[in-house]
Amino acid sequence: MLAFYFAKESTLSELNSLVIDGLSLAQKLDLLKAIKLGAGAKSRDNLIKSLTSLKKIRNHLAHSYYHAEDDELKKLYSDIFIRNLVLGFPKSLSEEKRNLEARCTKLWQIMLKGPQT
C-alpha cells in the first residue's frame, strides 16, 4: 500500500526493494499513520491498532521461551483487543479477519488514488 501511495507504476518495484522492504513493521505502521488519508483515516487507525496488537501477540510467542510469565501475560491481557480476541476465540478471530480485509480494501482504494492534497 505504501509503495502504491508514494510511487508511480514505473518506479514502484524500485521503491519497494530499496525502501519499503527495509522497514520494520513498526516503521511501516508509523509511516502509514503519518499519511493524510481524509475519509480513510478511521479505517487506517483501526487497521494500525489491530496490527499493533497482533504484533504484540506474535512477538510474545516468537521471543518467549515460556509463555506463562505472569507479568508479560498481564501486560498482553491489558490490551482490550487482545483480551477480546482471546476470550471470543475462535469467532473473534474470524470477525477480526473480516474487519482487516475490509479496512485493507478501503485503504487500497485510497492509496491507489495517490497523495491527498
Image (cartoon, rainbow, N blue to C red):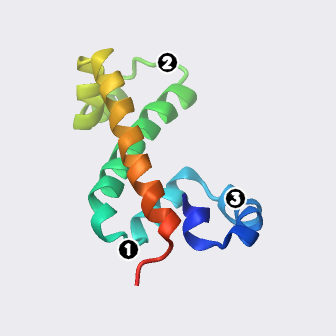
Q: Is residue 58 above or below residue 106?
A: above
Q: CA distance from mark 3 to mark 1?
A: 23 Å
| For discs 3 and 1, the disc positioned in front in the rendered view | 1
Q: Secondary structure at mark 2?
A: loop
Q: Name the residue type under label 3.
A: Gly
Given residues 55 and 41, the one toward you in this image is 41
Given residues 11 and 66, the one toward you in this image is 11
Q: Name the residue type under label 2.
A: Tyr
Q: CA distance from mark 2 to mark 3?
A: 30 Å
| For discs 2 and 1, the disc positioned in front in the rendered view | 1
Labels 3 and 1 touching (C-beta < 8 A) = no
Residue at the spot of label 2: 66
Residue at the spot of label 3: 22
Residue 116 percent across, percent down from the top left: 41, 78
Quadrant placement of the N terminus: bottom right
Earlier in the chain: of badge 2 and badge 1, it is 1
Q: Secondary structure at mark 3?
A: helix
| For discs 2 and 3, the disc positioned in front in the rendered view | 3
Labels 2 and 3 touching (C-beta < 8 A) = no
Examine the image and state in which quarter residue 75 appears: top left
Q: Is residue 97 above or below residue 108?
A: above
Residue 110 percent across, percent down from the top left: 43, 63
What residue is at 53 percent from the left and 58 percent from the top?
28
Labels 2 and 1 touching (C-beta < 8 A) = no
Q: CA distance from mark 2 to mark 1?
A: 41 Å
Residue at the spot of label 1: 36
Q: Is residue 82 above or below residue 17?
A: above
Q: Residues within 10 Å of mark 1 (few under 14, many from 20)?
A: few
What residue is at 30 percent from the left and 50 percent from the top?
46
Q: Name the residue type under label 1.
A: Lys
